[in-house]
């Protein structure tokens, strides 16, 4: 057999291996290069509190959840009641990141649907979201006491994700 004929066959075999590996992965999990790395530093204005800001430095020493949301986000409306209920158990501070939204719309949305956040900050131009690698809202990041990202939830939280992933990890990080 001609050696040149083996090259395409070999390339095809390599592609099959990559395809087989890809098919074994969960399509809802997109690996984040930020897991295990420091959360991107930010200082942002607090929603509905003129002149106040919040920064990642303010959260050092605490395990906290950064949840990106927006008043225009349909999936956020799906996730929101679950976050409101979860926040009532007070397991950790949930910081809202109002992503590419008008401040007045964000304030109205929280008044209408409830406010699970210890505080919400505004990200009008999306720069904070870009630094965190946000693909779309909602996305959430669990950050440890040292400011290291330990978990990323892409899309809305479900009861199963809270119960099986987030809550056990919070308990582990609080030790």
Image (cartoon, grey):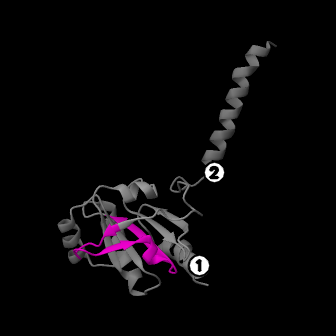
Q: Is residue 131 above or below residue 162?
A: above
Q: Which residue in the protein does label 1 denote?
A: 173
Instruction: Tell me residue 160's x, y (percent).
Output: 50, 72
The disc at residue 24 is 2
Q: SS at mark 1? A: helix
Q: Residue furthest bottom?
A: 89
Query: Is 130 on the left-hand or right-hand side of 27?
Result: left
Q: Residue at x 27, y 59 (%)?
A: 124
Q: Do the residues labelled 1 and 2 touch (CB within 8 Å)?
A: no
Q: Residue furthest right?
A: 1
Badge count: 2
Q: Distance between the residues labelled 1 and 2?
A: 29 Å
Quick one: label 2, few (<14), some, or many (20+) residues within 10 Å? Answer: few
Query: Is 55 on the left-hand or right-hand side of 1?
Result: left
Q: Which circle, 1 or 2, is nearer the viewer?
A: 1
Nearest to the observer: residue 113 or residue 142: 142
Nearest to the observer: residue 53 or residue 87: 53
Q: Residue at x 50, y 64 (%)?
A: 152
Q: Quadrant of the C terminus?
A: bottom right
Q: SS at mark 2? A: loop
Can you tell which quarter of the image residue 74 is in? bottom left
Quick one: label 1, few (<14), some, or many (20+) residues within 10 Å? Answer: some
Q: Does the magenta stretch include residue 124?
A: no
Question: Could you tell me if residue 3 is visible in this image?
Answer: yes
Q: What range of the chain is rendered magenta? A: 44-69
């Amino acid at each position: 057999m001609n050696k040149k004929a083996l090259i395409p066959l070999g390339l095809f075999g390599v592609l099959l291996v990559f395809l087989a590996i890809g098919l074994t992965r969960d399509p809802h999990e997109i690996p984040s290069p930020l897991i295990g790395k420091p959360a991107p530093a930010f200082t942002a204005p607090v929603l509905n509190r003129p002149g106040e800001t919040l920064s990642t430095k303010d959260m050092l020493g605490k395990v906290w959840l950064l949840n990106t949301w927006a008043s225009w986000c349909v999936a956020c409306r799906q996730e929101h009641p679950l976050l409101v209920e979860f926040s009532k158990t007070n397991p950790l501070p949930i910081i809202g990141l109002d992503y590419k939204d008008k401040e007045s719309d964000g304030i109205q949305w929280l008044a209408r649907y409830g406010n699970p956040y210890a505080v919400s900050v505004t990200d009008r131009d999306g720069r904070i979201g870009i630094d965190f690698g946000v693909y779309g809202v909602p996305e959430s990041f669990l950050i440890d006491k040292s400011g290291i990202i330990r978990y990323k939830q892409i899309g809305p939280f479900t009861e199963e994700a809270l119960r099986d992933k987030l809550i056990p990890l919070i308990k582990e990080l609080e030790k």
